[in-house]
Image (tube, rainbow, N blue to C red):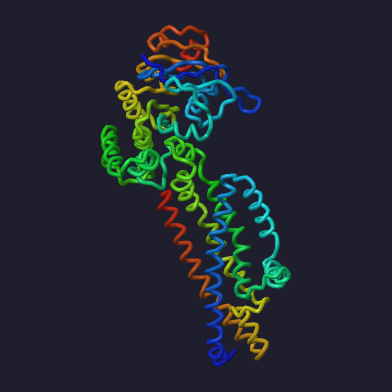
Amino acid sequence: MSWQIIQQSLPMFQKGFILTLQMSALGILGAIILGLMCSLCQYFKIPVLKQIVGAYIELSRNTPLLIQLFFIYYGLPGIGLKLSAYTCGIIGLIFLGGSYMAEGFSGGFDGIPNSQIESGKAIGLSQGQLTRYVVFPQGFALSIPALAANIIFLIKETSIFTVIAIPELTNTALDLIGLYYHTNEYLLVLVVGYAIILIPLSIILTWLERRIRYGTFGD
Amino acid sequence: MTELLRVEHLNKAYGEVPVLQDISFTVNTGEVQVVLGPSGSGKSTLIRCLNGLEPYQSGTIYFQGQKIDPTPKNWQLLRQKIGMVFQSYDLFPNLNIMDNITLGPIKVQKQSKATAQKEALRLLDTVGLADYTAKFPRELSGGQKQRIAIVRALALHPDFMLFDEVTASLDPEMVRGVLEIMANLAKQKMTMIVVTHEMNFAQQIADNVLFLDDGHILESTPGKDFFTNPQTDRAKEFLQSMDF
């Protein structure tokens, strides 16, 4: 194990680190928005959309991200849609994450007692008002643990981006190993790189989970 | 007396099982109608039908002489005129007491925040909880929550109130406070339909008693007579079983 080798590689890893963070952030944001819309379609049983969402969730959850990425990166140009690897990666992450987030939100919405919905209806709230003031705030608080787990999961999944040659953390490590054969050093930096992102994030999310739960339900 | 609510030949079934059969009755403005009957007789289902929380298969409900077209949209508009209080209070845990009470007036009736809050404070004062506006439901006892739930329903100034066993999940010492509030409302000539198992209370406030058994109205008797002189044997049995 040579510290010098590690030191020399750090600037390259730094670039990969930033790219991983960037793509994760965009992908997760997109996945949360897509997931919320999907789960609302399902919660309110909106005809047609509900079926489309159901099919999407099954497709997305039951195919590997690797294959989804291949499809987007190598398949879409076949129908005239040529996107950069960077864009493909983010789309892939949103496509995969959207379904997981949708399931997370749905779990939260389904956890709201029916009596809450009824007492909202009883004071004359419309469907939209019921969603905004009762269903969403309570459902969101209940779905936080699932959403937090999905966030961590999606960040780890970005390591697969290496197969379409996006120079994120894993790709940087594999590249360096291929060039210089210092496998131990580069793998160590790789592991530390992910840990630096994931461990603090995991702690923050757990803290947030408790805060929001307490703020909403008091326990 | 003016007729406020009239139910004609209401039928409801869960699948094949009939829950309410040929229910007909009238409630006049300012009247307290108490619905009594053994568990599973359809009391709760009946009053849930009266604000559209339960769909019914046939029959007609008239409100202020107008036939209610039972579409979800119509019920939504009507519900601000119908106050309902549930057994399990069901305050919104994510909102403080003031917001729980003013949500309907502000969002549904488009009152200004100041007007709604002023009225909420006035109503809170009548139930002795004016100091609780900033608290959350989790900080309150069951009895306090139920009093807030009554205020939340009253804040919309409904034309009548539905009470669905509102003291059934309260500790005995909490029950009295809630019943007193309801008795006061009755004194102020609020039209009320009350499902309860509190027989002394029922006798005290009932202008009329509907006695339900197995989905049928077995008798509809003025309150002053029902408890002393019920018409049916089933009602006699029921009163005896309640140690009355």
Question: Within the image, what quadrant is residue B162 found in?
Answer: top left
Q: Is residue B200 visible?
A: no
Is B156 left or right of A78, judged from the image as shown? Answer: left
**Quadrant showing the C terminus of chain B:** top left
Q: Would you place residue A90 above or below residue A143 in this image?
A: below
Q: Is residue A166 visible?
A: yes
* Residue B212 in the image, given as x and y percentages of width and height: 51, 17
Is B116 left or right of A190, judged from the image as shown? Answer: left
Q: How many marks?
A: 0
Question: Within the image, what quadrant is residue A86 found in?
Answer: bottom right
Q: Would you place residue B213 above or below residue B101 in this image?
A: above
* Residue B201 in the image, given as x and y percentages of width and height: 37, 20
* Residue B31 in the image, given as x and y percentages of width and height: 37, 18
Nearer-the-camera pick, B189 or B59: B59
Q: Would you place residue A1 above or below residue A74 in this image?
A: below
Is A3 left or right of B225, judged from the image as shown? Answer: right
The extreme front residue here reads: A80
* Residue A168 in the image, given as x and y percentages of width and height: 59, 78
Q: Would you place residue A82 above or below residue B183 in this image?
A: below
**Quadrant showing the N terminus of chain B:** top left
Q: Residue at x 49, y 11 (%)?
A: B219
Nearer-the-camera pick, A71 or B176: A71
